[in-house]
Structures are given as C-alpha cells and as structure tokens.
Image (cartoon, helix red, strand yellow):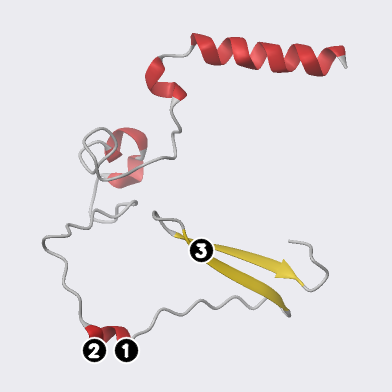
Amino acid sequence: MGNTHQAQKSRLEADALQPEDTQIDMYEWGYGKERGPDTWWMFFPAGSGNLQSPINISPEEAEFSPEEVATYPLKVEYSSGEGSKIVWNTGYTLQIEVRARNGLY
C-alpha cells in the first residue's frame, strides 16, 4: 500500500507544480473567448485548418433545412452483434455506449 500512496502523493505534487494553463482539462473546448475557435490551434493541432476538429460552426451563418434533415437523417450504425446502444448528446458531441449482450463493453 505504501507504493500506491506514494505514487498518488507524487502525482498530486507534480500537478501542483504545473503551470495553471495545463491544469485545466486539455480536452475541454467551447465557443467562448478562452477555449473558443481562436484558441483551438493551441490545444488541438488539428483545429487550425480546413479539416479542423473541433469544427468551428458559426451560428449566425448556419442554416437549418427541415427538408434536408428529413432526407438525410443522422444514422448511427455499429455492427457489433446483438446488444444495447445508447446515444447521448453531451453538448459537445454525440457519445455512444455500446454494450454486448452479456453486459460487457
């Protein structure tokens, strides 16, 4: 148990020594000033070009077409055999949980 406790203590001490910017969740992004599209390139190297991720969707330029939604509905296809699939809208992305029939992931 001493080794586990020491490892946890060392991790906490190392975290305390990191600059404040690196203590935030590095996977967190948004559309605000500090974590918005203008800063994505710093946190996400793939976020600074035409094939960027996250995708910079400008709400003022986005158009909604009920006809296109009806014609091209979102489909989630995952052929892992039988089991349950649960989809959540996390506010950032769709999160899909796939469980096998025996309850294992």
Residue 40 lies, in percent from the top left, at 29, 40
Amino acid type at mark 2: Glu
- Whether residue 30 sits left or right of residue 37 in the image: it is right
Q: Quadrant of residue 69?
A: bottom left
Residue 71 lies, in percent from the top left, at 31, 90
Q: Residues within 10 Å of mark 1 (few under 14, many from 20)?
A: few
Say which residue label 3 marks: 88
Residue 34 against residue 57 in the figure, above or below: above
Can you tell which mark lies on residue 58? Answer: none
Say which residue label 2 marks: 67
Residue 14 lies, in percent from the top left, at 57, 12
Q: Residues within 10 Å of mark 2 (few under 14, many from 20)?
A: few
Amino acid type at mark 1: Ala
Is label 3 in a helix, a strand or a loop? strand
Is label 2 in a helix, a strand or a loop? helix
Image quadrant where one finds the C terminus? bottom right
Toward the viewer: 54 or 67?
67
Number of marks in picture: 3
- Whether residue 92 sits left or right of residue 78 in the image: it is left
Can you tell which mark lies on residue 70? Answer: 1
Amino acid type at mark 3: Trp
Is label 1 in a helix, a strand or a loop? helix
